[in-house]
Image (tube, helix red, strand yellow):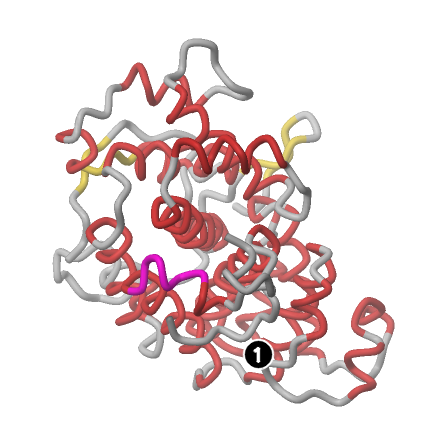
């Protein structure tokens, strides 16, 4: 089974394109196909932990950006996952539902709305100049928070595209909580 | 964020001074792709440059991570009909273009073409690299960086 066409829209292949390593370390990055590339694996592991632990944004804010990105990329696995530290930080499924819909939903708190706008800008039109977004970000987010937002998007957008490219993605998955792989 | 206090465009290292730990880890991941056993650096540089063209980043296009024959640079946008690119490079460039447009649209045949030349490890390394190169180019655009040199914070 490869690419399937459905009324002109492509769907994600359900057949994995590589065999993951035969390891069972309990670390979902090491045990995934990413574990096949020895030169990059330690850096993926270190960057993953740094994204969650070494920046000023809350786990809930990081998770909202990650989920908005997952919808853009169409990564079913990324959409199904909830990081437990974000749930513990107060992330609600109501908020997830709001950021998962196209456009900007009325009623989103201003800070979360700006996260959504930033993700959309990063994914859809990074070369466009958006003076209003920049002004609003400067009012609501510190410089370190804005750098964190950009770097977490650099990480999650690349990661989710990689996951989709490797194949093996089902059409749907149930919601599941995971921990940051350490 | 795009300019330093003295008014000049900032480098990557200057921007991520606000968050050095994450900035260092992302830089380390980026640099790790240029010494892979599974995919030649020259092939990855062609893919990075093609992404720069597709994303419209002049700074990324002008930057040289790995030295290439000038003929390959000049002909990069016309790679499908150009004999100056090897079959292995063409397989990677085709995957690069699909990855840039919509990773969901990559076909098994396109993935197999890369695996034929570089194996499963090379295929995984390539899609990892494309995600990180794409990210670096996007950071360059949104931060209006002076260069794509990934320097240390």
Residue B18 magenta-highlighted: yes
**Disc 1 packing (10 Å; few <14; some 14–19; many ≥20):** some
Residue B27 appears in view? yes
The location of residue B23, given as percent across then percent down, is: 36, 64
Of A33 and B1, which appears nearest the observer?
A: B1
Residue B111 appears in view? no
Of A3 and A59, which appears nearest the observer?
A: A59
Which SS does the magenta portion mostly show? Answer: helix
Query: In this picture, is B126 found above or below A131?
Result: below
What residue do we see at 64% from left, 81% from top? B64
Q: Residue furthest front?
A: B6
The location of residue A157, given as percent across then percent down, is: 46, 48
What residue do we see at 51% from left, 57% from top? B135
Q: Quadrant of residue A171?
A: top left
Query: In this picture, is A161 found above or below A141?
Result: below
The location of residue B20, given as percent across then percent down, is: 31, 64
Report the residue marked by disc 1: B117
What residue do we see at 19% from left, 34% from top? A177
Query: In this picture, is B130 found above or below B104?
Result: below
**Magenta span covers which residues?**
B15-20
């Amino acid at each position: 089974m490869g690419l399937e066409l459905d009324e002109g829209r492509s769907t994600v292949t359900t057949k994995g394109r590589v065999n993951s390593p035969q390891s069972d370390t309990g670390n979902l990055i090491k045990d995934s196909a990413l574990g096949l590339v020895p030169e990059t694996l330690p850096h993926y592991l270190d960057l993953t932990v740094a994204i969650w632990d070494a920046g000023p944004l809350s786990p809930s804010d990081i998770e909202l950006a990650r989920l908005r990105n997952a919808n853009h990329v169409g990564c079913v696995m990324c959409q199904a996952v909830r990081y437990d530290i974000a749930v513990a930080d107060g992330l609600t499924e109501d908020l997830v539902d709001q950021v998962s819909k196209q456009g900007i939903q009325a009623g989103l708190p201003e800070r979360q709305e700006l996260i959504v706008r930033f993700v959309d800008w990063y994914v859809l039109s990074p070369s466009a100049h958006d003076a209003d977004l920049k002004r609003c970000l400067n009012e609501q987010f510190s410089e370190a928070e804005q750098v964190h937002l950009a770097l977490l998007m650099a990480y999650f957008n690349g990661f989710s595209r990689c996951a989709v490219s490797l194949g093996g993605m089902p059409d749907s998955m149930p919601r599941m909580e995971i921990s940051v792989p350490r | 964020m795009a300019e330093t206090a003295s008014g000049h465009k900032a480098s990557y290292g200057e921007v991520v001074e606000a968050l050095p730990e994450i900035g260092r880890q992302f830089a380390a991941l980026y640099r790790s792709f240029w010494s892979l056993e599974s995919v030649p650096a020259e092939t990855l540089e062609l893919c990075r440059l093609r992404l720069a063209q597709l994303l419209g980043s002049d700074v990324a296009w002008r930057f040289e991570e790995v030295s290439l024959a000038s003929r390959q640079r000049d002909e990069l946008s016309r790679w499908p009909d150009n004999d100056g690119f090897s079959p292995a490079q063409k397989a990677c460039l085709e995957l690069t273009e699909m990855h840039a447009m919509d990773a969901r649209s990559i076909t098994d045949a396109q993935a197999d073409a890369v695996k034929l030349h570089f194996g499963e490890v090379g295929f995984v390394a390539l899609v990892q690299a494309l995600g990180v190169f794409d990210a670096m180019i996007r950071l360059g655009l949104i931060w209006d960086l002076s260069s794509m040199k990934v320097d240390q914070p």
